[in-house]
Each structure stands twice: as structure tokens, then as C-alpha cells.
Image (cartoon, grey):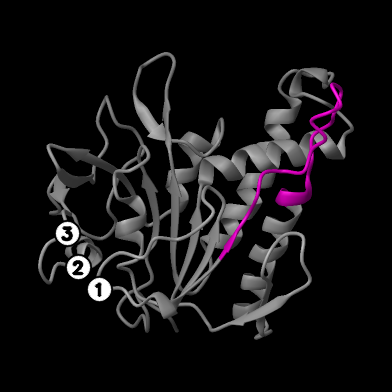
Amino acid sequence: MPNAGNRNEDYKHVLLCGTSGVAKSTLTYYAPGPFAVLALDKSSIDVPPNVDPAQVFYKTFPPAAIDLTNDKHGRARNIADQIIRDIQLIRDHFTVKKPLQITSGVDTKTVEEWPTPKTVVLEGGDFLAQHILNLICARHNKLNPSEFGNKYEAWGLRLAELTGIYDILTYLPCNLIVTTGVHKDEETGALLPDLGGAMCEAGPRKFHSSLYVYAENGKHYVRTRSNVKFKGFKVGGKWDAPEVVEVTLGKDLNPWNKLFT
């Protein structure tokens, strides 16, 4: 019978939030490899020092395919469909032991077989939210969310779709890292992880840790707790963790281990 004292693995499911250039990706690739990476917000991966690039298997996603010459172009769902297929392939690799065969791009039939990952990475949670909104509009033949009969309908459908995706990801038996930007609450001014609408508040609860990454005076830091200015942040399993942890790279420093061991 499983209990908290006999876990074979100690997987970390982590949400990293922050503006561009604050070292979210740097922190990500100090987690254990091999990595299976779905990069929604960039066209290439920069592997930080002392990380083996041969352990980083990644796929990038172009912008959704739309006809910019048509003023009435609809929402394209091709990227959202591909993201969902790839996440399901990763799930099936762990649950029914299917080989992890990923097409190398969105508009190609070339297939790469990736090794079993110790860490799955989704770079661009905020980009995922936009692609899923495109998917919802395309399914219902709408150009914009305002065209739905109920003004909340599109956002509710997106929330349900995102919830399903994150439910798959956060039950994977491996480390998981999702990176995203920041969302500012219009009423309170607090900063939250940008996961798309209501998911900004609901999403962090699905993760072992939800961390705010920032840079200041040439150094890099991680915030591990919530307050009135920062909402939804925590580091799981370390009740005595300092409120702010410096993760600036230095000789022999592994920032992942500094946070989680």
C-alpha cells in the first residue's frame, strides 16, 4: 500500500513565472535530464553552462497559420491541435509504454524517437492559453470571443480545455516544468502566473511549486511565497524555505538542487 514514507520517486511539478530574460529557462535545464521540451515561445533552445545539450530533445512551434491577406481571416487551430497531440503522446509513453515518437515540426511528417524523459518542459504557458483560445473560436466558427452568445462562453470553454491539459501534465510520473509570463490583476495590482484568465489563479494549485523568477542588479532570484503583491507562489515540501532564494549561476552551482534538495 503506498504511503508518504515509501515513495520511489520524488517528482517536482514546477511552474516558473517571470518576465523575459530573468533566467526561467536557465533554471529549467538544471533539472534532471533527459528533457522532452515543447517550446511554444521560441524558435530554439539555449542550453546553459554545464548542461549536456545531447540530453535536451525539443520541438518548436511556429505562429498559427492564418491568411493575413484576408481581412476576415478566422482563428487557426493547427498549433493547438499539434500541442495537444504531442502532450497525449507523452502521456501514452508513460501510461501504455508507447515509443515517444514526435514529429520534428508542425508541417512535416519527419518523426524523431525521444528517450524517456526525466523532465518534461512546456515553455510558454501564456502562449498555450492563446493557442487554445484560437482552438475554441475555430471549433465554433467564431472570429472572436465576443461573437459567442454569452460573453463568458469562450473563456469558460478555454478554462475547461486548459484544465484538461494541465491535469495530464501534472500527473506525469516525471519532473514537469512550465514556464510563463506574468499577469497583473486589474483590481489588486498583484502579479500572478499568466496561464490565461481564470487559470491564472486556479493553475498554480495544480503544481508542487509555483515560483516567481526575477533579476535585480545583475543577480537572479526566486520568490517562494505569496503576499499581497505576488499571488499563487510557493515551494512545495520545504516549510523553512526562505522567502527569496538567489539562483545566480556561479562555479559548481546547480540552482535546481539549491531549490529542491
The numbered mark, 3 or 2, whose residue comes first in the sequence reads 3
Residue 30 in the image, given as x and y percentages of width and height: 30, 67
Examine the rendered structure and indicate whether residue 250 appears above or below residue 160.
Answer: below
Q: Position of residue 110 (x, y in %)?
A: 74, 75
Residue 245 higher or lower than 249, as above or below: above
Query: Does label 2 or label 1 sit earlier along the sequence?
Result: 1
Describe the element under mark 1 as helix, strand or loop.
loop
Q: Are marks 2 and 1 in contact (CB under 8 Å)?
A: yes
Residue at (72% x, 63% y) in the render: 85
Kindly identify which residue carries mark 2: 254
Do the CB atoms of the residues marked 3 and 1 lie less than 8 Å apart?
no
Q: Estimate the x, y position of residue 233 in percent, counting from the top left.
A: 31, 42
Label 2 crowd bin: few (<14), some (14–19), many (20+), radius 10 Å:
some
Q: Quadrant of the C terminus?
A: bottom left
Q: Which residues are magenta?
A: 59-80
How would you classify the magenta stretch by its main secondary structure?
loop
| Amino acid found under the numbered disc labelled 3 | Leu
Who's the residue at 63% across and 71% down the image? 91
Report the residue at 77% width, 66% height from top: 108
Residue kind at label 2, given as amino acid type: Asn
For residue 219, side relative to residue 111 (left or right): left
Q: Quadrant of the N terminus?
A: bottom left
Q: Left or right: where does residue 130 sit relative to residue 245?
A: right
Image x and y of residue 201, in percent = 46, 35
The residue tagged 3 is 249
Comparing labels 3 and 2, the label whose residue is closer to the camera: 3
The alpha-carbon separation of the residues under discs 3 and 2 comes to 8 Å
Q: Amino acid at mark 1?
A: Asn
Q: Nearer the viewer's eye, disc 2 or disc 1?
A: 1
Q: Which residue in the protein does label 1 denote?
A: 50
